[in-house]
Image: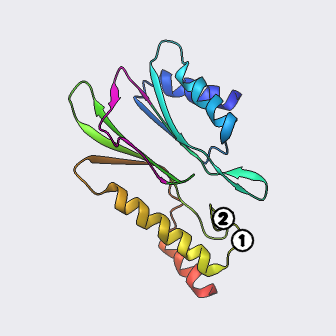
């Protein structure tokens, strides 16, 4: 919890209006405790939405948390919150109170090649891995198109062209 305190304290000191954490490795009661802690930040009116992590080999992986200061941003619309991919993509539609600009904040934790599997792909082969990566990017693309401005934050596990070429040669 000390790392969490430092992350939240640093964000508050920096005057952050929106905060996103990915690969949180929490779910269930632990996730609820984390959300409660963020909401309790002194002097701030923080709101939090989250998607819990998923189990891989008896350990929690993934998870996305989006928090915002309600004095600066407010949740907007009937479908303001969307868990796009469990444990990997969470979307929250917010409006800045100072100017009225609406923005879709997308917290994303992309799968990476050769690492632990995401939900539904715990023990797959190379084809499952490619499908998981492709499904993630398809879901992210589908979510970001629309009328809103979009800000994507998180860990996209980007691979440079050289790394992609090396991966293709190993197949």
User: Which quadrant would residue 166 be assigned to in this image?
Assistant: bottom right
Q: Left or right? Give the position of 6 relative to 109.
A: right
Q: Disc 1 vs disc 2: Cβ atoms closer than 8 Å?
A: yes
Q: Residue at x 62, y 32 (%)?
A: 32
Circle number at residue 159: none
SS at circle 1: loop
Give the distance between the C-alpha atoms of the residues marked 1 and 2, in whole angstroms: 7 Å
Q: Residue at x 48, y 68 (%)?
A: 135
Q: Residue furthest top?
A: 43
SS at circle 2: loop
- In the rendered image of this protein, does residue 101 appear above or below residue 147? above
User: Which quadrant would residue 29 be assigned to in this image?
Assistant: top right
Residue 12, position as x, y percentages in the image: 49, 23
- In the rendered image of this protein, does residue 2 appear above or below residue 21? above
Which residue is under mark 2? Answer: 117
Which stretch is magenta?
A: 68-84
Residue 127, position as x, y percentages in the image: 60, 81
Residue 157, position as x, y percentages in the image: 54, 60
- In the rendered image of this protein, does residue 102 appear above or below residue 143? above
Q: Residue at x 61, y 70 (%)?
A: 113
Q: Nearer the viewer, residue 66 or 163?
A: 66
Mark 2, Cα crowd under 10 Å, few <14 / some 14-19 / many 20+, is many
Q: Nearer the viewer, residue 27 or 106?
A: 27
Q: Residue at x 62, y 87 (%)?
A: 171
Residue 111, position as x, y percentages in the image: 57, 62
Which residue is under mark 1? Answer: 123
**Colour pattern:** rainbow
């Amino acid at each position: 919890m000390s790392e969490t305190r430092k992350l939240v304290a640093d964000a508050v000191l920096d005057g952050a209006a929106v905060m996103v954490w990915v690969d949180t490795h929490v779910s269930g009661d632990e996730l609820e405790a984390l959300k409660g802690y963020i909401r309790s930040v002194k002097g701030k009116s923080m709101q939090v939405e989250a998607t819990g992590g998923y189990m891989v080999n008896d350990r929690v992986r993934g998870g996305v948390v989006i928090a915002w200061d309600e004095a600066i941003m407010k949740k907007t619309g009937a479908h303001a919150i969307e868990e796009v991919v469990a444990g990997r993509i969470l979307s929250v539609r917010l409006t800045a109170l100072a100017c009225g600009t609406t923005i879709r904040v997308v917290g994303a934790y992309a799968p990476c090649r050769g690492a632990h599997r995401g939900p539904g792909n715990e023990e797959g082969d190379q084809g499952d891995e490619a499908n998981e990566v492709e499904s993630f990017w398809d879901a992210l693309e589908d979510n970001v198109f629309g009328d809103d401005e979009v800000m994507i934050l998180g860990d996209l596990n980007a691979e440079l062209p050289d790394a992609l070429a090396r991966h293709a040669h190993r197949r």
